[in-house]
Image: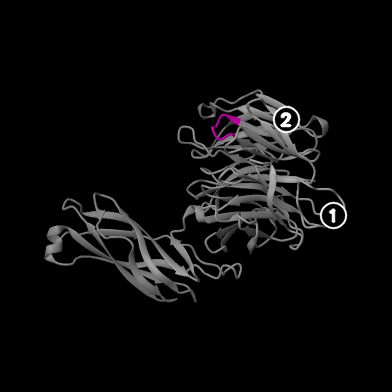
Amino acid sequence: MLGVILLLVLMVSAAGGPADAAYSGTRPDLSLSGTTAQWGSYADYVARDLTVTATISNGSAAAVAYGVQITGASANNGVTLTSTLPVGAGDIAAGGSGTADLHFNVPESTGSFHTNISASAANGGITFNYPVNPGDLLYAEASSGGPRISVIDTTSMTVLNEFTDTTITSGNSHRIQISTDGRYAWRGQNGTTGYVEVVDLQTGTQVKRWDIGSHNGPTMSNWTKGGHHFLFFPTGASGGVINVFDVEAQTFVGAIPVGETPNHMWDTSPDGTRLWGTVGSGTTSRAVSYDISNIDLGVIPTTKSAEITIGGSLHALAVDLERPRVYVGSTTGGVNVIDTTTNTVVAWKAGGIATSHNFTPSPDGQYLMVGESSTYGCSSEVYSDWPHDGTRGPVLWALNLDTLTVDKYFETQAYSKAAPSHQTYTNDSSHLLMSTTGGVSGVFVLDPDTMALQSMISIPGANPHSIGIAGGSGGLGGTTY
C-alpha cells in the first residue's frame, strides 16, 4: 500500500467577545485536531482515490460553531482534490469536534504531499472564515501611550488581539499601513527619536527599523511597479524629506528632498506617476507634486513638478481615484479642488470646516469623506454648504464629487464629540470605519449608504488615531487613504 505523509493546515485566530449588541456572533475557536488517510477499498486504491478524514475541534468555552464546512483545499506533488466543495462537518459544540471526508486523486508516483484547507462556520448569524481573510482584519493604532495595535475582525466587529511595545511609553504613531497579504504593518513612531518600523502581525515582533526622525502620515501606493508597492514617509528631519521604501523588499529606496517640513497628508496618483502633498503655512502654504514615474528604478526626484498656492493651514489631502483632481483642505478655504491637468484650483467649498483632518475617497469614487476635528459649537455661524445638527460636535461629511454638495453626514455630538481622524472601508465596501481622537476610545462603524452608526468598537488603551486594512482602504493594493 502506498505510504502517504499528509499535512493539513488550518490557521485560526482566537476569539474575543462581541463588541456591540448589533454584532452578536462570537468567532468559534476552531482548529484541526487530527487527520487519517486511507484507501476506502482496493478499487479506490486502483483508482488512486484516497480518503482523508479531517477532525475539526472547537476550543471555545461557549461559542457553538454552526454549519462547519470545508470550503477549499489545495495540494502539491500532482495531487488533486476530487471532492465537490463545500464538504460539511455539521454543528460543533463548544469543547466538541466534528469530521469531514475529503477525496484526493494521488498519482502512483507520489509518495507524500502537503495540502492546505480553508473552512467556514457560523455563530450568531455571522459566517466566519478560517483562516481569517487578510482583508477581514482591521488594525487600529493607539494615538498615545506608546505603540499599541488592536486587531479587529470586521466580520463580527470584535477585537481579536492586541500588540503592545512596553519598552516605549510615550510618543504615538500617526498612521498604520498593512501589506496586501496581511502579514506586515508599516508604522512610524513619533517623538524625539522617531522611526519607521515593520511589524510582523503574526508574532507582533519588529522585523525592520529605520531611524528617520519625527514624521507625518505615511502613504502606500495602490499601484505596483515591477511587482512592488512603495511607501512614502514624510519627515521634517534632514531639512524636510519624503523617505521612500520598497514594501515587498522591505528596503529603503531613497529620500525626496523637500527643503521644508512636509505637512500632514501625502498621496499618489492612481497611475503611479505623481506624489502629491502640502508644505508651508499661512499665506505661503502650497500643494506640491513630484514626478515618481521611475521610482521603481531608484530614480528619486529632486525638484517639484508643480506648486499651487492655497493659503491657510493645510492638513487634509487626497487624490481622486477617477478624475484628474486633488483635494486639499485649508482652514481659510474649505476644500480646494485642484485640476491636475492644469495644476490650478478650479473650485472650492468654503466655510464649515475649522480643521479638516483627513479626506477619504469612497472605493467607487463617488464621495469624498471630509472629517472635521474641531469640537466647539457653532450654531450661530453660517454653514450652508456643510449641514449639521445645530450646536454640534465634529462631523464626518460625505461630499458628492460629481456635484460638490454634501449628500449625507455623521455627527459625533452625542458621542463625547469624538473628533474624526482617519477612515477606511471594509473590502466589500459594506462598512465605513472611522477612528477618532478624543472623546471616545473606539472605532465607529458606519453604514456608508446612510452614514448611520451601526456599532462602536471599544479599543483598549488610548484613542485610535489610525486604522488600516489589508488590500483595501488604508492598505496596499486598494486605495491609499
Which residue is label 2 attached to?
239
Give, as a three-letter code, the residue at label 1: Ser
> Could you tell me which secondary element the residue under label 1 belongs to?
loop
Q: Which residue is mark 1?
A: 379
Q: Main secondary structure of the magenta part?
A: loop
Q: Position of residue 207 (x, y in %)?
A: 54, 46
Residue 169, can we see it? Answer: no
Residue 163 position in % (x across, y down): 59, 57
Viewport quadrant of the N terminus: bottom left
Q: Is residue 467 magenta?
A: no
Q: What residue appears at the point 78 percent right and 56 percent down from the top-left corner?
A: 393
Q: Which amino acid type corresponds to the residue marked 2 in the rendered image? A: Gly
Depth check: give the residue in front, 187 or 357.
Answer: 357
Q: Residue at x 32, y 70 (%)?
A: 99
The residue segment tinted magenta is 269-274
Query: Which image quarter holds the C terminus?
Result: top right
